[in-house]
Image: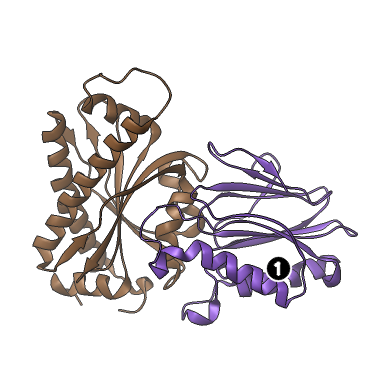
Amino acid sequence: MKDINNLGDTHFDILKEIGSIGSGNAVTSLGKMLEKKVEMPVPSVKLLEFKDIAGFIGGPSNIIVGVLVSLTGDINGIMMFILDMKSANAMVDVVMGGMVPKNDTFGELEMSAVNEIGNILISAYVGSLSGLTKLRITPSIPYMSIDMANAILSVPAIEFGKVADRVLFIESGFKVDKIEMSGYFILVPDMPSLSRILSALGVG
Amino acid sequence: MSGGMIVVGMADLNVTRAPGVLTTLGLGSCVGIALYDSVTKIAGLAHIMLPDSKQIQNNTNVAKFADTAMVKMIQDMIKLGAGKDRLKAKIAGGAQMFAYNSTNENMRIGDRNVEATKKLLSLLHIPLLASETGENFGRTVELYADDGRFYIKTIGHGNKVL
């Protein structure tokens, strides 16, 4: 496959399934970590225009947290975990058990907490993707950024920009307990890796 | 529209005349190229994602690349009445949003976008009046066609006028 515009319904279903299993695994580990019940709606697979990429997370100027891990091995690309600030604060609060004073600042401690949560979630996701496809995937250490949604999402967008005029997002949100908290996983394989994933799962 | 401004999306470009204002939101590794003719008060803004259309097969969207976006924007500005020889440039963006492995060619895309843009401006003999590029944070820019001022807004890294 040379172009993501050639993706058909079967491909979308497979990618949705990958998202479902990957984020299911990740969210289960989050639930264990937080000792809370987590809910996860069915993930969606979207091909978005560049101008629309920040729509799902409050628009281009909304401040979000992004944790990024680069993937190498049989699958090359990037994997991101994205949260809006409200969810990031709520998550830190739950993880730290209210030890962090409630204020509006998001300091070193909060940042490293979210970075580590992101890392654990991404590792769980990538682990299940690797198990599912029998492909070898080596994740890098996590990198984090807090900034405008468009600026953060420009990183996966540019990767896709090299091969297409749209961005493929495998997007999975979740909620923790009664606390409104939503996060998204974005898997961005390069084109040869996307083909490898699909053929590993029996659709060329 | 955002407060009466013309919004330029990612991989998009637009031109306007005074008193129009062009804006593009959250430039990360992308570069915002602002061109301005102060005599006719015609302004153009492009939000490019990649340095060079010739290295990429899928290049139907001209606004995605520094080279093709610049040519298209200049043509559009001339159509509105701008003079090519009067155009001056200001640029912003080209950040590295995630600190990872700066030796990796792919991750230096911000730098490469800035380098390509500067090189093109010099090839086209368009003076670069000011630039605000690099670092590791996003930038929202506004270009005012009445006097060519170029606002740069960041989250926690201050605001500037070029």
The chain ID associated with circle 1 is B
Which color was chain A given? Answer: brown
In this rendering, the answer to whether B90 lies above or below A93 is below
Going by the numbered disc 1, the residue's amino acid type is Met
Front residue of B133 and B24? B133
Q: Position of residue B22 (x, y in %)?
A: 70, 51
Total number of numbered discs in the rendering: 1
Position of residue A169 in the picture relative to residue B13 (left or right): left
* Quarter of the image where the N terminus of chain A is located: bottom left
Q: Residue furthest front?
A: B103
Residue A22 lies left or right of residue B69; in this view the side is left
SS state under label 1: helix
**Residue A87 visible:** no
What shade has chain B been given? Answer: purple
Q: In this view of the protein, which residue sits in the foreground, B90 or B8? A: B90
Above or below, A197 relative to A26? below
Residue pictured at 41% horizontal, 63% vertical: B107
Q: Position of residue A185 (x, y in %)?
A: 28, 49
Q: Left of B22 or right of it: where is A2?
A: left
- The answer to whether residue B78 shows anywhere in this view is yes
Q: Which residue is labeled 1 in the image?
A: B73
Q: Is residue B104 above or below residue B53?
A: above
Q: Position of residue B56 (x, y in %)?
A: 47, 79
Residue drawn at x 82%, y 71% as measured from the top left: B84
Q: Position of residue B154 (x, y in %)?
A: 57, 41
Q: Residues within 10 Å of mark 1 (few under 14, many from 20)?
A: many
